[in-house]
Amino acid sequence: MIRTRRLGRSVAPKPSSRRWRQKAQRPAQILAAAFEVFAAQGFEAARIDDVAKRAGIAKGTIYLYFRDKEQLFRAVVRSLIPKRLDVLVKTMPAPPETLLRELLAQMYTHVVRNPKVRAIVRLLVAESGRFPRLAEIYHREIIVPGMKAMREVLRRGVAAGEFRESQAIDFPQLVAAPGLLALVWRLLFSERHPLDLDAYRQAHVEFVLRSLQKGRT
């Protein structure tokens, strides 16, 4: 190692800022390449070699960050949503109706309209029968936080007297269901039968609020 002398002592040179930035950006670089490989080839056919080639790095570099292909896939799924919805609910002080509107808006922005989510859902539909852990990863990283957030907002609404008690607290999937239908619709029919997502989302919100709020029919 080359060293320089300062005040009579041997001091190692600091790494260049460029090299430090490259290292800091490496995980994101790997995840971007991995998504492209998974989306194009599917989980079974995807190889770590392909990810490394697309990222322009050595195969061994990937193993410094991810143990195997499944852990890499988990990280890709986790990266699809920029902020967990259950964290959003905890950090956003607002009335229950406002929170519910925001949760549904986040769902449409980061899930329904997200082409990366559609690509991963397409992969799950095709391959989760052979690799059930893939669906479990998506469920744990995307579905569980969303349902937890929705359930918390519904409970707050009931406690505040804004929402009536209903089984939606036990099955928050009922509140999210129109958004999931929109995701599947876009996956299967978007080219020939496109949805007006802005109008659809407004109808979704109105439908949910009418079913939850006291005094509305």
Image (cartoon, helix red, strand yellow):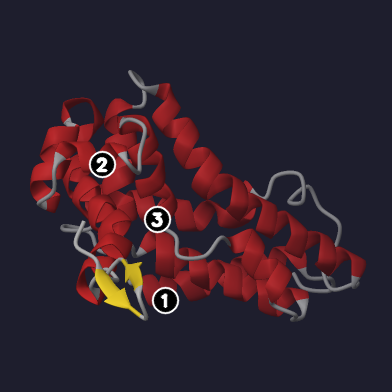
Marks 2 and 1, the one that precedes in the sequence? 2
Label 2: how many Cα within 10 Å (few below 14, some 14–19, many 20+)? many
Pointer 3 and pointer 1: residues touching (CB < 8 Å)? no
Q: Nearer the viewer, residue 213 or 179?
A: 179
Say which of marks 2 and 3 sits in front: 2
Q: Please state, as top left, top right, bottom left or bottom right, where the N terminus lies in the image.
A: bottom left
- Dot 1 lies on which element? helix
Residue lying furthest top: 130
* Residue 89 on image: x %, y %: 68, 68
Say which of marks 3 and 1 sits in front: 3
Amino acid type of the residue that numbered disc 3 sits on in the rendered structure: Ser
Marks 2 and 3, the one that precedes in the sequence? 2
Amino acid type of the residue that numbered disc 1 sits on in the rendered structure: Ala
Q: Is residue 194 above or below residue 47?
A: below
Q: Please state, as top left, top right, bottom left or bottom right, where the C terminus lies in the image.
A: bottom right
Q: Is residue 179 above or below residue 38?
A: below
Residue lying furthest front: 8
Q: State which quadrant residue 50 falls in.
A: top left
- Dot 3 lies on which element? helix
Residue at 68 percent across and 52 percent down: it is 148
Where is mark 2, residue-wise? 62
Left or right relative to 80: residue 152:
right
Where is mark 3, residue-wise? 79
* C-alpha span from label 3 to label 1: 28 Å
Q: Nearer the viewer, residue 179 or 114?
A: 114
Amino acid type of the residue that numbered disc 2 sits on in the rendered structure: Ile
* Residue 71 on image: x %, y %: 39, 35
Label 3: how many Cα within 10 Å (few below 14, some 14–19, many 20+)? some
* C-alpha span from label 2 to label 1: 43 Å
Left or right relative to 216: residue 79:
left
Question: In the image, which disc is placed on residue 199?
Answer: 1
